[in-house]
Image (spheres, rainbow, N blue to C red):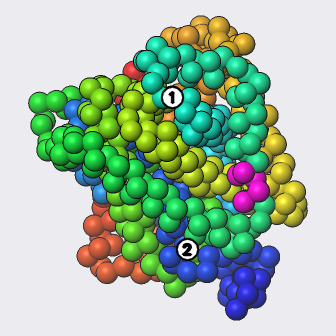
Amino acid sequence: MTESSSAAADSAAGSLPANRGRWSSRFAFILAATGSAVGLGNIWKFPYVTGENGGGAFVLVYLMCIAAVGLPIMMAEVMIGRRGGRSPVNSMRLITERDGLNPAWRLIGVMGVLTAFIILSFYSVIGGWAISYVGVTASGGLAGQSSEGIGEIFSGLLADPGTLMLWHTVFMAMVVLVVARGVRAGLERAVKILMPALFVLLVMVVGYAMTTGHFSEGVAFLFEPNFANLSTSGVLVALGHAFFTLSLGMAIMMAYGSYLPKNVSIAKTAISVSVMDTVVALLAGLAIFPIVFANGLEPGAGPGLIFQTLPLAFGQMPMGSFFGALFFILLVFAAWTSGISLLEPLVEWLEEQKGMNRTISSVVAGVACWALGIASVLSLNLWSDFAPLGSFAMFEGKTIFDLLDFLTANILLPLGGLLVAIFVGWFLSRQALENELSMSARGFALWHNVLRYFTPVAVAVVFIYNLT
């Protein structure tokens, strides 16, 4: 059955509009959702926040948070998307109308799409850094460099608006090219190539890390918990990162869920995505920490771990140019799959609401996102002294880049997840949820109670903590 004919069949059943695509299989959805979840958060952020918060104890708390907070919200978001069968905005509208709920709840979809749009605007800039580093590393530009030299390479990149614009444009064009081709020919085909390639590259870098003589030290750092090294703030960071890494609160899982066939188990699929995402994050740690330890570097180096600390290591190691380039290609692939998912909710809405075809809606959304990204590019150099909301204590000294990052990560994402948990856990009928999820009575009761009582409190604590 072709994509169009299968969509038409779904339309006849009243679940999808006739012109919509859908995933060809459960595995295709898992790859796409994992591709969304596996991004810079896994390869870049997870290793450095683990390093900053003491290693193994942080990892253990993080895994618990994935199970108790991330997984229940992911299931809720996918369920909204499949139940509504439209873009996140229209799925929320249809569900509230169908169930006679307050129409204000549809703002969850609006906020999610807006959040994804804002994130992609500066995420594309960081993706451009990774593309730039592929060339710098492959050409031997890091070989023999001192820490000062590596720092100058990175600061030189940030200080050059022309180069940043070039790579920002290239990355956004890569994203638009895939999304414009549709669900099966674009999103699904891309992740079927990129995700296995990403995994192979990651395993190769882990294999390289095993030759450093410090692999056991990296394993111990990741998997031997020492709770003396974990502070209360570290627990909250673990909770926040578990939420962020699964692409929650940004309407992606609603958009992807709207293409999910009715006969696919949401629970089993969400568990598979969570497991694969966690495996990639742990593999990234196994790839990075042995290299860091082998070179006597600091695992808690913060955001500069990937673009300053690791390049220093690659510059000193045998075959460092080859494996360094391999690592940054891996980083580009991870960012690319996430970028695709971030653009999809807005494209889906433009198709439905404005009657645009797939190509035009992708180009319009991509250009708008690229234009906002210019502000982030300039805030790293020409506008580095400009703090739009500097008069507010919470935003004091934050450039446009910093402000967009803070707004999405600390306000919009947790707020969106909190509202999803409350909406699904307390306002949608139990019967509708049971019909959509098709879980065992015990499994459903566990998920429903966690979503109603534990998850909102946990997310609210992170939300309040981030604002203090």
* Residue pointed to by mark 2: 28
Q: Position of residue 255 (x, y in %)?
A: 62, 61
Give the quarter of the image for residue 370. Answer: top right
| Horizontal and vertical percent position of residue 251 | 59, 53
Tell me the quarter of the image containing the C terminus. Answer: top left
Q: Quadrant of residue 408?
A: top right
Gap between marks 1 and 2, in whole Å?
38 Å
Span highlighted in magenta in the image: 174-178
Mark 1: which amino acid? Leu
Disc number lying in front (1 or 2)? 1
Q: Residue at x 56, y 10 (%)?
A: 397
Is residue 28 left or right of 117 when viewed as pictured? left
Note whether 61 is above or below 145 in the view shown. Answer: below
For image coordinates 26% across by 76% down, the residue present is 442
**Residue at screen point 73% across, 27% down:** 163
Q: Is residue 417 above or below residue 15?
A: above
Q: Nearer the viewer, residue 374 or 409?
A: 374
Q: Which residue is mark 1?
A: 142
Residue drawn at point x = 36 percent, y = 79 percent: 439
> Predominant secondary structure in magenta?
helix
Where does the image place residue 62, in percent across and percent down from the top left? 29, 46
